[in-house]
Image (tube, rainbow, N blue to C red):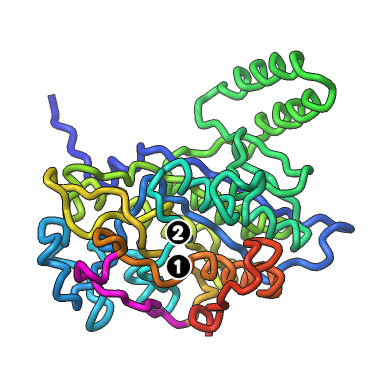
Amino acid sequence: MPKLNLTRREFLKVSGASLFLAGLPLPGFTTEKPPGTISVIMLEGGMDGLTAVPPFGDPNLLRMRRNLTSNNYLKLNSFFGLHPSFQYFAGLMAKNNASVVHATNFPYVLRSHFEGQNLMQGGGLSPFSETTGWLGRALDLAKVPGRSLSLDMPLVLRGMSDNDNFYPASIKSSSDLITQLIDAIAMAHQKEGSEIFKKVSKKSTQKDSIVPRNPASLAKYAGKAMSQDGGPLSSVIKVDQFDTHANQGAGENGNHGTQLTLIDDIIAGYKEGLGDAWDRSIILTLTEFGRTVLENGTGGTEHGYGSAGLLAGGAITKSRVISQWPGLAKNEQFEKRDLMSTIDYRSVCAACIEKSLGLDHDLIASKVFYTPKLPRVYDQIFS
């Protein structure tokens, strides 16, 4: 019997992810089409920013995490490098279409997955304080209603009440089963709920709803949809399994390296799908927190605070690493264990909204993130 050999990237093609599309300009409702598109890659579990973008210029890095730092990192400048899994992202950096924000996060320090993920999506002042999400509220202000490519619209996209959604299936004849199930649910709901489920039922049988479920294909599909006239202006792809408490690994074949390859493939998929629309696109990653500076006794890391954010897209015209580096010495760490966050990642999200949806920073700060004095970092990213 012939032996089946799979490369790591071929193996990743069967890995699952979730895609959500939103922001449809409507004639008579949308005043004018916003200048670009915005896409979010949510990394659930806590991406290790020190592994993804190692600060090899900090003398404490290898002292504290020799087994978690790749020897063949991709050099960005005299201080920072990229994990070897980021081959495509590194190419975008070389072409001035990608940047890194390091030592950053949402202002959340309690290290709970549930609270951290809720805050990074809700964008409120505390976990579970909002029923809408920061991107959904921004789409509201830009007058582009939402639509989610899934039965469960994520919090980050929730905004006005006329958001709706549909779920793509990749299994032959599965739409019949989906329709039957939705019809059964609709019968059990009152009139208002029933109408919503009927809309979902209709859309679940549309021709273009048959979409491969691997992350790169979903990103390509999203890019193509956003590149069309009148297509959605926003998308969200969710990837999990970044919670590496043991056997995290340093190189491409480690647990964290495998997940970083997914990010790389998703960004490549977006660029392929977007085509010429790449020039007006911005893609950013979100994660609920980083990891501890010191590796633990099982070759992994615990929940931390500061991490790194990855930005890509043609809207970026000069690549850079944006950081107010806090240092990794024990007395420079947050609570003597975590990378300190010195840049509020809400400011980064605000800059991406400003660029893609054409909204004023002060409006975004007050109406989207409820923080009128939120620092503006737009020029650091897009100038």
Residues in magenta, as a range: 318-333
* Residue 366 or residue 352, whichever sits in front: 366
Disc 1/disc 2 C-alpha distance (Å)? 7 Å
Where is 96 relative to 310, above or below?
Answer: below
Image quadrant where residue 55 sits: bottom left
- At label 2, which amino acid type do we have? Thr
Where is 97 relative to 232, above or below?
Answer: below
Image quadrant where residue 205 sits: top right
> Residue 278: image x %, image y %?
54, 68
Location of the N terminus (image quadrant): top left
Residue for badge 1: 311
> Residue 346: image x %, image y %?
53, 65
Q: Residue at x 37, y 77 (%)?
A: 323
Q: Is residue 138 left or right of residue 316?
A: right
| 1 and 2 marks in contact (CB < 8 Å) | yes
Where is 181 relative to 196, above or below?
Answer: above
Image quadrant where residue 62 sits: bottom left
- At label 1, which amino acid type do we have? Leu
Principal secondary structure, stretch drawn in magenta: loop
Residue for badge 2: 285
Answer whether residue 267 is visible to the viewer in this image.
yes
Q: 10 Å neighbourhood of mark 1: few (<14), some, or many (≥20)?
A: many
Q: Is residue 178 left or right of residue 146?
A: left
Q: Residue at x 53, y 80 (%)?
A: 382
> Residue 143: image x %, image y %?
78, 59
If you read the primary sequence from the N terminus, does the residue marked by circle 1 or circle 2 appear first? Answer: 2
* Residue 8 or residue 74, whichever sits in front: 74
